Image (cartoon, rainbow, N blue to C red):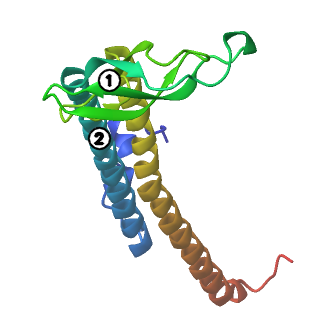
């Protein structure tokens, strides 16, 4: 008998066969449903990644750098080896309203030192927007994380169902063997 190869090997569960049991049909449907759900999870992950990338692109367009002034001396000294410290700053929003907040600055900077902060359209303090490369990396990582997480659920569920079907088949096999085995008139063990 030749080994099954090609597309026929993938569809063996669907072939008509008088020896095919009910559990074989259930397993075939379980495998099909599992793979369809895994595929759907991959599509959802792709959409989520696109959504993240669009959001980060919108931030790049809407968020603006604004000049601000330190309102107090920044803690620390430049020689201490600390890269950046938190300090209070004041800036004017595009609508003319004054705002205050905290941002990272060089240690030991004096009050009145000009710094650049990033604001959203409402003039509120935000982080520097992600570059295109950073946005693409974030979207890819989120897509992978969502895809793997979402695909793991139906995949694990399918494995559990197939494991139970296999155990049930083995139990049925044992029951059938106990019934038929003694009719042969000899025992193997």
Say if residue 5 shows up in the picture: no
Outermost residue toward the top in this view: 79
Residue nearest the viewer, comparing 123 with 108: 108
Check disc 2 and report its element: helix, strand or loop.
helix
Image spot of residue 187 (x, y percent):
81, 81
- The residue that disc 2 covers is 48
For the point 48% across and 68% down, the residue is 161
141 shown above or below 31? above
151 relative position to 40: left or right: right
- The residue that disc 1 covers is 118
Residue nearest the viewer, comparing 50 with 117: 117
Q: Quadrant of the C terminus?
A: bottom right
Quadrant in the picture for residue 146: top left
Quadrant in the picture for residue 50: top left
For the point 44% across and 39% down, the residue is 4
Bin the neighbour count of mark 1 within 10 Å (Cα to Cα): few under 14, some 14-19, many 20 and up: some
């Amino acid at each position: 008998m030749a080994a099954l190869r090609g597309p026929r090997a993938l569809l063996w569960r669907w072939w008509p066969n008088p020896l095919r049991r009910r559990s074989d049909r259930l397993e075939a449907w379980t495998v099909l449903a599992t793979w369809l759900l895994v595929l759907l999870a991959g599509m959802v992950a792709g959409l989520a990644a696109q959504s993240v990338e669009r959001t980060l692109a919108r931030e790049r367009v809407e968020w603006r750098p604004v000049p601000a002034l330190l309102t107090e001396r920044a803690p620390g000294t430049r020689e201490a080896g600390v890269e950046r410290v938190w300090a209070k700053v004041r800036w004017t929003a595009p609508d003319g309203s004054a705002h205050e907040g905290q941002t990272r600055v060089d240690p030991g900077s004096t009050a009145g030192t000009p710094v650049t902060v990033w604001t959203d359209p409402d003039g509120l303090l935000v982080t520097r927007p992600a570059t295109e490369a950073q946005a693409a990396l974030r979207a890819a990582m989120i897509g992978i994380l969502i895809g793997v997480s979402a695909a793991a659920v139906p995949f694990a569920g399918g494995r559990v169902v197939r494991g139970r079907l296999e155990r049930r088949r083995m139990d049925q096999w044992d029951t059938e063997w106990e019934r038929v085995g003694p009719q042969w008139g000899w025992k193997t063990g």
